[in-house]
Image: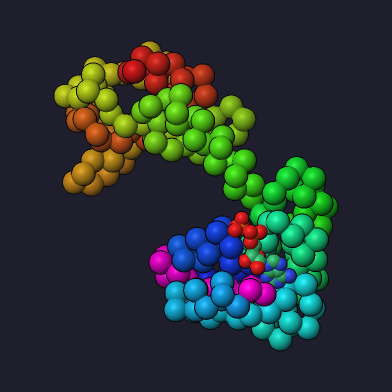
Amino acid sequence: MKVNQFVIIGLGRFGSSLGTELMRLGNEVLGVDRDEEKVQDLSHILTHAVVADATEEEVLRSIGARNFDCGIVAIGDDVQASILATILLKDLGVKKVVAKAVSDLHGRVLERIGVDRIIYPERDMGIRVAHQLVSPNLLDYIELSQQYTIAELAVPQCLSGKSLDDVNPRGRFGCSIVAINKPKGIIIAPVAKDVLTIDDVMVVIGTNVQIEQFQDSIR
Ligand code: ADP
């Protein structure tokens, strides 16, 4: 995978977790925070970490912010600082700017500035966890559109030992199993005779209604 260069403004809980994971995935990360302690904590994990106030244009210029593939503004509580840092990154010409929003209004302002992606970590995680709590087999999901979803469902005891032909979600509900993740490896585009085993993970694509019906049938 291509090594990307990221600059993260704000090394709080979200920024530090994001930076640590981007490093683990083999990227280069410059972290910026005005709090020296935060910078110290991450200095041995990130490629570079600097103490600076990201609302000062000269600061962002001097760290060469515009040369990064992506800038992430991970400041939450100080909304004014978040907005200023975001505008500066955009004006400096950073190719892609991602920002964290802590409220709808904050998000709306970021949208007006032209941020490429706005993340609402608490709100989105709340929604995700709610889905997982009401659907015990649901491990994760991606909403493709308002109507269509890809869901990862754990294979429950009642499906263990059954083939896709037996389970037949496409015939019964209209959704398709497009992959089965087994401990030994993933089967892409499985065929009718492939057999499910407890704790395999099915990757299912379909409408929200089709997937819900399939989930209800395997509770
Ligand atoms: P989280 O909820 O992810 O912990 P916070 O808003 O609490 O987010 O933390 C954001 C981080 O951003 C803090 O470490 C704070 O020191 C840093 N920060 C806030 N304003 C600036 C600024 N102007 N320049 C650089 N860092 C900043």
On the image, which quarter does residue 136 sit in? Answer: top left
Relative image position of residue 121 (x, y in whole percent): 59, 48
Q: How far across and down, in percent of the image, does residue 159 sit?
A: 24, 21
Does residue 104 show up? yes
Ligand 1's image quarter is bottom right
Q: Is residue 78 left or right of residue 32?
A: right
Q: Residue at the spot x=41%, y=66% of the render?
A: 24
Residue 25 belongs to magenta span: yes
Q: Name, please, the residue furthest toward the bottom.
A: 62
Please say if 149 is above or below 81.
Answer: above
**How far across and how far down the image is residue 149, in percent?**
51, 32
What colouring method underlies this structural image? Answer: rainbow
Q: Identify the residue at image location x=28%, y=40%.
A: 181
- Closer to the camera, 179 or 55? 55
Residue 23 falls left or right of residue 163? right
Residue 11 position within the rendered picture, expressed as x and y whole percent measured from the top left = 58, 67
Q: Quadrant of the N terminus?
A: bottom left
197 vs 116, left or right, is left
What residue span does the magenta drawing correspond to?
23-35
Q: Residue at x 54, y 41 (%)?
A: 125
Q: Is residue 64 above or below residue 27?
A: below
Quarter containing the C terminus? top left
Residue 40 is left or right of residue 172, and the answer is right
Which residue is painted at 22% across and 23% down in the image?
A: 157
Q: Quadrant of residue 12?
A: bottom right
Residue 144 sits inside the magenta stretch: no
